[in-house]
Image: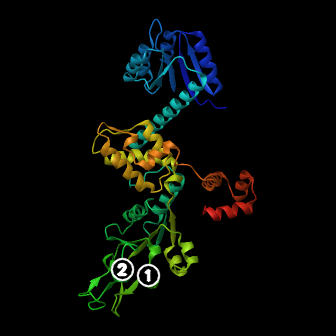
Amino acid sequence: MTPRGSILVVDDEPNILKTLKIYLESVNFTVDAFSNPIDASIILNDKEYDIAYFDLKMAPIDGMQLLKECKQKSPNTTVVIITAHGSIESAVDAIKNGAEDFLQKPFNMQEFKLFTERVYEHHKLKKEVRLLRSQLAETKIESEFVTRNPAVLKQLDIARQIADSSLSVLIEGESGTGKEMLAQFIHNLSNRRTKPFIKVSCAAIPETLLESELFGHVKGAYTGAIKDREGRFQAADGGAILLDEVGELPQSVQVKLLRFLQNKEFERVGENVTRKVDVRVIAATNRKLSVAIQEGTIREDLYYRLNAVRIELLPLRERPEDVLILIQHFIKKHNQGKNIEVSSEALKLLTTYRWPGNIRELENVIERGVVFARDGVIKTEYLPDEIQKVAEGKTGILSIEEMEKLHIKRVLGVANDLEEAALLLNIDPATLWRKRKKYNL
C-alpha cells in the first residue's frame, strides 16, 4: 500500500516517541522519530516531510528553535508543536513563528488520530493550492475558460475545430456553466470575429414582441410600431447571433427560425419583402431539447437544424478538480492588485459545496469574499450562509443516484468499450446501456 505521507516526530520522552511512531505507521504514514533534536535538525537538510511534530521542551535545542530551522530548511512542512499543560503562551508564540497548530499533553490516541487527520487534510489542501497557483501563473488563459477537466477540455477542442465554419451550434448546460462565454469563445476564434456578435435572451422578451425583436418590423405592423425597425438578425449580418434559452421560443417564431436556418432568409413583421443575411446561429439552453421534443414544445426539424454541432457543458459539481483553480482565477480577476488568500477552513467549505449555481455562483462568492477580506484573507464568515451550512453537514451530500452517475462516468472514461465498462461495474451491458441513457452519459 502506498504511504499517505511522511511525518517527522521529535520528542525526548522515549515512551511518547515510540507510541506516536507505532500509531502513525499503523495508519499508513512513513515516520522518522528522533529523541535528539540535533539529529532531526540534520535530517531536515536532506529530507522534506509533510508534517512535523516537535515537543516544545527539549535539549540541547527546544522545539521553538527546531521550528525556526524547519521553516528555513523545509518551508512547506506543516509543523505542530506538542506542549505540556500550562505552556499555552509558548504555543501561541510558536504559531506566530510558523507552526500550524499545537497539541497539548496529555492526550489520548483517539484525540491524536482526529488531530492528525485534520492537520494532514489541511496540509494536502495547502499543497494543492500552491501547485494550482504555480500552474495558474504559468498558464496563458486565452478565454474565461479555466479547466483541467478532460471532458470540458474535449468540448473546448471541438469548439476550436468548428469555430471557422458556418455550422449552427447548440450549447446545452445548466445555468451558470458558461454557455454564453463558450459562444463568445467560438465567435472570437472564427473568421467572423470582426463582425457583430448579437446576443438575445429568448426568455426575457415577451412572446408578442419576440418575432419583431429577431426579424424586425415595418411601420404600422402592429399597435406601437411607429417606424420601421431592423431586427437582430439583420443587425448581425456577416457575424453571429446567440439565441440564449432557445427552448423558450414560441411555435410561431420556431417556424420562422427554421426557414432562416434552411435558406438564410426572412421577412420583417408586416412586410412581404424577403431579405437575406449571412448570420451564424449559436443557440444555448439549460433544457434538454431532446426532452422538449417529446413534450411537444420544440419542433423536431428545428432541433436537428440547430444541432449541427452540439456541445454540453458539465455542471461544476461534476468538475471537482476545477474548483480550486477557478477560485484562484477569480481571486486574480477581482483582487485589484491586492494579495488575497483563502483560509484553510473556507477552502474546505468551498471545495465541499455542490455549487447549484455553477461557475457564475462561484465567481460571485469569490468577488464578495475579496470585498470583505480587508485583512487579505477570505474567511468562512465572509461566505454565504448556504456554504457555511456545509460545515454543519446540511448540504454537500451526494444522493445515491448522483454517486452512481459519477461512478459510471469514471468507469466509462477508462474502459475501452461498453462491454469492458459493464464487466468492471459487474452489471449486464444492457443494464449499463439503460443507465447511460438515464443519466445522459
Disc assigned to residue 257:
1
Secondary element at image label 2: helix
Residue 74 drawn above or below residue 246: above
| Image location of residue 425, percent across then percent down | 71, 52
Furthest residue in direction left, as rendered = 226
**Residue at 45% across, 57% down:** 357
* Amino acid at pointer 2: Leu
Residue 7 drawn above or below residue 317: above
Residue 429 horizontal side relative to residue 281, left or right: right
Residue 101 horizontal side relative to residue 96, left or right: right
Q: Are marks 1 and 2 in contact (CB under 8 Å)?
A: yes
Question: Which one is nearer the viewer's eye here, 61 or 374?
Answer: 374
Quadrant of the rendered structure where residue 216 is? bottom left
Furthest residue in direction bottom, as rendered = 272
**Residue at 50% across, 45% down:** 352
Nearer the N terminus, badge 1 or badge 2?
A: 2
Query: What colour scheme has been applied to the protein in the rendered image?
Result: rainbow
**Residue at 69% across, 63% down:** 433
Mark-to-mark CA distance, 1 and 2: 9 Å
Residue 123 drawn above or below residue 309: above
Residue 336 drawn above or below residue 375: below
Label 1 packing within 10 angstroms: few (<14), some (14-19), many (20+) = many
Residue 117 horizontal side relative to residue 272, left or right: right
Disc assigned to residue 214:
2
